[in-house]
Image (spheres, coloured by chain):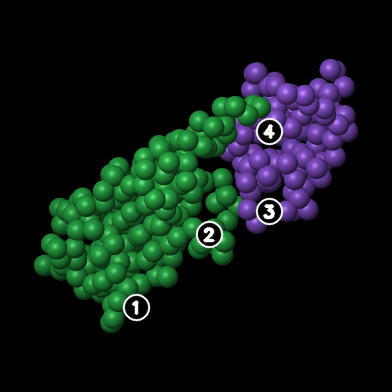
Chain colours: A purple, B green
Amino acid sequence: MDHTFDMHVSTNELKTKIIESLRLQEVTPEQIEDDAPLFGTGLGLDSIDALELVVMLEKHYGIVIKDIEEGRPALRSVRTLAEFIEAKQTAK
Amino acid sequence: MAKVVVAAAGIVTEADLSTAKMGSRFGRMDLLSQLALLAVERLGINFEKMDRSRIGVCLAVSAGSLPTDIEYWKGRKEIGGPSPTLFAYTLPSSAIGEIAIRYRLTGPNLCFVGTDATLLPEARDLIERKEVDGCVCVACDVITTAASELIRVQPKAQVRAVFLVRGTNGVALEEKHRDMESVCALVCAGESARNCAR
């Protein structure tokens, strides 16, 4: 299967993908702050959501995280995740 | 001795989901858990006034978790693999967990796969043995098209819920009331309809 990925990742686009992949209801991209923590407080995601986000990264951006320790800093906020995706895509 | 009564009963179908306001995490549940949770919500029971360590949850699932198992299995062909969230629902008893978490019910629970014929008698026993003060009973008939092709029964998405408690405020649960369908029909008919959630 051939996939091409956009190098630039906007936080708004990422928020939409997070909402879709986690099937968040009654949440809009505008309600998610770029720097708010994704886990615990903020969006209040949990460990299963973390795995779902890892799958989302592979599905939509072609990024495979094999070690969760590598992904942990990236999953802090929408902004850190967008930066992580851009860095990974630039390194390809 | 006070009798075991049906304090509330109700039925939900897939059509009810479109108007459900159950919070941001409701969407990640599988169809069975969504319907089970919505059916309990519609009962309108205020669990906060009860000792929640003495409220049980009994569940009957006609096809187990088969619809979700199939969906999960199909996901293996997708990039990134099947949904980790969905994996959590490949257990027939997952809906019990969702109900217990939402209403913070920490009493005993039971899960029956197949017929719901033992659901009410077992829940009633829990109350009569004084292991619990009340019991949430949920019977799930959730069979997706994919599952129906496999087990050759009609697709269905209907969940019945009742709340049993020792007392007088409700419809007395008698020996002859062994299945959820007839109990819900009884409660939702005539003078008992005030206990019916629709």
Q: Where's the C terminus of chain A, which quadrant?
A: top right
Q: CA distance from mark 4 to mark 2?
A: 26 Å
Of helix, strand and loop, which one carries label 3? loop
* Distance from Cα at disc 2 to Cα at disc 3: 17 Å
Q: Amino acid at mark 2?
A: Leu
Question: Looking at numbered disc 1 in the image, what kind of residue is underneath it?
Answer: Arg
Name the residue rendered at 40%, 38% in the picture.
B150
| Alpha carbons under labels 2 and 1: distance apart | 23 Å
Q: Which residue is mark 3?
A: A27
In the rendered image, residues at marks 1 and 3 fall on the same chain: no
| Residue closest to the eye, B58 or B160 | B160
User: Which label sits on residue A56?
Assistant: 4
Q: Percent x, y for residue A44?
A: 62, 44
Q: Nearer the viewer, mark 2 or mark 3?
A: 2
Q: Mark 4 to mark 1: distance in Å? A: 47 Å
Q: Which residue occupies the foreground of this view, B115 or A34? A: B115
* Amino acid at the residue labelled 3: Val
Q: Is residue A16 left or right of residue B87?
A: right
Please give the chain letter of the residue carrying mark 4. A
The answer, for residue B36, to whether it is visible in the render is: no
How far across and how far down the image is residue B97, in percent? 41, 44
In percent of width and height, residue B187 lies at: 28, 72
Looking at numbered disc 4 in the image, what kind of residue is underneath it? Met
Q: Report in which chain the residue with disc 1 lies.
A: B
